[in-house]
Amino acid sequence: MNTVNPQTITLLLHEVRSGSNVAFNRLYESVYDELHRLAKNIKFHRQGQTLNTTALVHEAYLKLIPTKDQDWQNRTHFFRVAARAMRQVMIKEARYKLAGKRGSGISNITFIDDLYIQNQIKPEDLLSLDQALTELEKIDARQAKIVECRFFAGMSLKETAAVFDVSVPTVKRDWRLA
């Protein structure tokens, strides 16, 4: 996540919060490639339609648009919230799939972990994971957020450590415990 200077993102986030449309456009240009790269490991498939990486990024970004009530602290905070937004988009998509056919004939959602582990996850399992993460947040919020960053935003161990300003071994331990 070193494509854009972290201070630039932080400055743009504060300018957007102040209502600057120019800053909003620059922010979008600055984070788009990074969000796209993070989402690239996540693929959705629905009968006859695909929520591809670009669609996931666009949907998540709409959830990230700062408002005057939102206090973006810095680039790190932004990307943690981006992981949450991707989770929300994926959960919404899973609910949509289940509502349409109640599980019959639905393709799986594929996640490719940076550890080269490929998992096939059905929409109902994704919803169960979401519920489990909600419960984990009550016990250990950082572990739940680490899962969001790794699983839903496709961040590597090193990227996740940078986002939380902790060591890679700490992320590994929290990932394993979660």
Image (cartoon, rainbow, N blue to C red):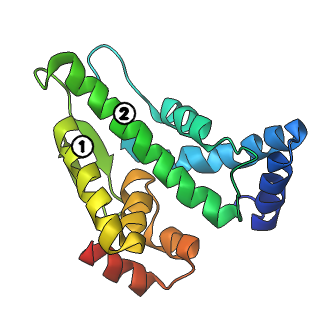
Asked if the residue under mark 1 is in contact with the one under mark 2, i.e. CB atoms within 8 Å, the reply is no
Q: Would residue 172 be seen by someone viewing this image from the given angle?
A: yes
Which residue occupies the foreground of this view, 136 or 159? 136
Say if 13 sits above or below 166 in the image: above
Which residue occupies the foreground of this view, 109 or 126? 126
Farthest residue, direction front:
69
In primary-sequence order, the first of circles 2 and 1 is 2
Where in the figure is residue 155, as x and y percent of width and height? 47, 61
Type of amino acid at the residue the image marks with label 1: Leu
Where in the figure is residue 166, as x and y percent of width and height? 52, 83
Count neighbours of disc 2 (C-alpha within 10 A) and say few if under 14, some if 14 to 19, many if 20 or more: some
The label number, if any, that marks residue 127 in the structure image: 1
Which residue occupies the foreground of this view, 20 or 59? 20
Question: Residue 89, located in which quarter of the rendered image?
Answer: top left
Q: Which residue is mark 2?
A: 92
The label number, if any, that marks residue 102 in the structure image: none
Relative horizontal placement of residue 142, taking residue 82 as reference (left or right): left
Picture residue at 45% right of the left edge, 60% below the top: 149
Question: Residue 77, located in which quarter of the rendered image?
Answer: bottom right
Q: In what quadrant of the picture does the C terminus appear? A: bottom left
Picture residue at 22% right of the left edge, 36% below the top: 123
* Disc 2 from disc 1: Cα separation: 9 Å
Q: In what quadrant of the picture does the N terminus appear? A: bottom right
Relative horizontal placement of residue 88, taking residue 125 as reference (left or right): right
Q: How many marks?
A: 2
Picture residue at 68% right of the left edge, 48% below the top: 31
Relative horizontal placement of residue 111, taking residue 53 as reference (left or right): left
| Kind of element beneath mark 1 | helix
